[in-house]
Image (cartoon, rainbow, N blue to C red):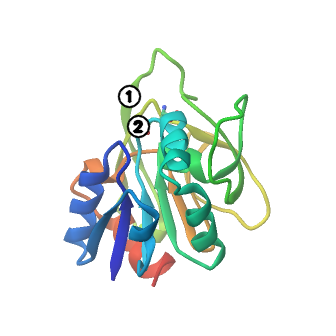
Amino acid sequence: MLVGVLALQGAFREHQRALDKCGAETRQVRKPGELSGLDALVIPGGESTTMGKLMREFGLLEPIKGIAAEGMPIFGTCAGLIMLAKQIRNSQQTNLGLMDMEVERNAFGRQVDSFEADLSIAELGSQPIRAIFIRAPYITRVDNGVDVLATYGDKIVCARQGRFLVAAFHPELTEDVRLHRYFMENVAG
Ligand code: GLN
């Protein structure tokens, strides 16, 4: 399986490492041509306003929407989650707008820049997953067709809609690769 990792900014190398551990081949994506032949795409964390601008400048916005419409599996983490949401609270920033949900950026509050928590995700088995949140968003509303995979308190932090998977945290920053494997085997497989 060849998985592209959007490499405009952010934690793309860490995603490549996790995917590599799961047995995938990876390719950094910066140009539209690098989307061809992919079996799946990962959109990493970073800064979503910057990422949206760069996607437009690099001519990637419409091509990614195009392959998504043709069924490309996409996994977005943190800023990547923001890129996939159809609605972003209080923001008109450029994004892909693929999943039927609303998100709020930096939603855990400014004083809580980052934190870690154990989340249970039934799809990954009974062992909880250690989640690292960094200036994280969360999902404020999901519409029909979006399945909630994990919550932190009452906040939705992991969800799936068909071939799209999103996490508000950074699964690429821990050694636990179960969410990447779930993406490869269940979402894209
Ligand atoms: N706060 C960032 C944003 O709004 C996301 C943070 C991250 O990806 N770690 O884009």
Give the amino acid at mark 2.
Phe
Q: Position of residue 176 (x, y in %)?
A: 26, 59
For the point 49% across and 55% down, which residue is it? 76
For the point 63% across and 79% down, which residue is it? 70
The answer to whether the residue bearing label 2 lies less than 8 angstroms from the nearest atom of ligand 1 is no
Question: Mark 1 touching mark 2, by CB under 8 A?
Answer: yes
Taking 8 as reference, is 32 left or right?
A: right
Nearer-the-camera pick, 125 or 140 = 140
Q: Is residue 151 visible?
A: no
Q: Is mark 2 on a helix, strand or loop?
A: strand
Tell me the tag on residue 114. Answer: 1
Q: Answer with the quarter of the image where residue 29 lies.
A: bottom left
Taking 185 as reference, is 160 left or right?
A: right
Q: Where is residue 72 in the image (x, y as percent from the top left)?
A: 54, 75
Nearer-the-camera pick, 170 or 5 = 5
User: Of label 1 and label 2, which has the lower sequence position?
Assistant: 1
The extreme right residue here reads: 144
Q: Is mark 1 on a helix, strand or loop?
A: strand
For the point 45% across and 29% down, which residue is it? 135
Q: Where is residue 89 in the image (x, y as percent from the top left)?
A: 72, 34
Tell me the tag on residue 133. Answer: 2
